[in-house]
Amino acid sequence: MELVPYSAADLWLTRALETDERVMAELGGPWPDERIPLIHERRLASVARGWWCFTLVPSPDDRAVGMLGIFESDFEGQAISEIGWSVLPEQQGKGYASAGLALLLERARADGRWGAIHAFPGATNGPSNALCRKFGFELVGQGAFDYSGRSLTCNHWVLDGAVVADAAHAAGATDPEEHA
């Protein structure tokens, strides 16, 4: 698995993920196609500001199968580090999200700037919640959260900054049973 920095060439991946009903089921539904260029440009601008957004590339000869990242966010008026991931439906269940998450958390540990990392998967998104458990995130609550103007019921998981150092190593790189 390789994490490749998100770039202008990844518009196709944003379109494939953000307009897919299955991928977006836990995020309020797919976005209309006309909104995709704006989402893509916002992602590129965020990367330019230092946020991490990577595509998941299983091997050098493969096309990206998803994306994941860590970014600055706001939770109850406090600045936090948030993590998120998406995998193309036909690539789910192959361990790609797990492998990518392991690599991303290892980078976060080495970088040291992110501190505690928060995740907000949909409350009924079993695979994403399983990944949070697998990598040592602690479930701290459930509630209604805003996602781009959409109110979603999500679980709130936190990986303590001190734990980030060990989470990727302890969880291993792949788990073919994961579906996200």
Image: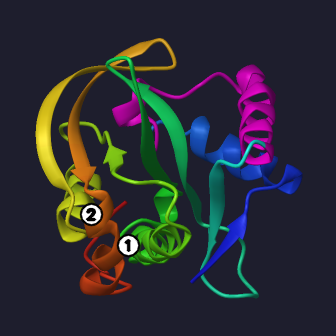
Q: Classify residue 39 by image quadrant.
A: top right
Mark 1 or mark 2: whose residue is earlier in sequence: 1
Callout 1: 10 Å neighbours few (<14), some, many (20+)? many
Residue receiving disc 2: 131
Q: Name the spot of residue 66 as percent of width and height, x first.
A: 58, 60
| Viewer-closest of 125 and 91 | 125
Whether residue 83 can be seen here: yes
Say which residue appears at 60% left-offset and 81% top-offset: 58
Q: Secondary structure at mark 1?
A: helix
**Which colour scheme appears in the figure?**
rainbow
Residue 39 is a magenta residue? yes
Q: Which residues are magenta?
A: 23-48
Residue 144 vs 26, above or below: the answer is above
Q: Name the spot of residue 174 as percent of width and height, x first.
A: 36, 84
Say which residue appears at 44% left-offset and 26% top-offset: 74
Give the residue type that dot 2 points to: Leu
Contact (Cβ within 8 Å) of mark 1 with mark 2? yes
Callout 2: 10 Å neighbours few (<14), some, many (20+)? many
Q: Name the spot of residue 36 as percent of width and height, x first.
A: 73, 30
Residue 42 is a magenta residue? yes
**Tag shown at residue 3:** none
- Label 1 vs label 2: CA separation? 7 Å
| Viewer-closest of 166 and 30 | 166
Does 10 sit left or right of 137 as displayed? right
Residue receiving disc 1: 98
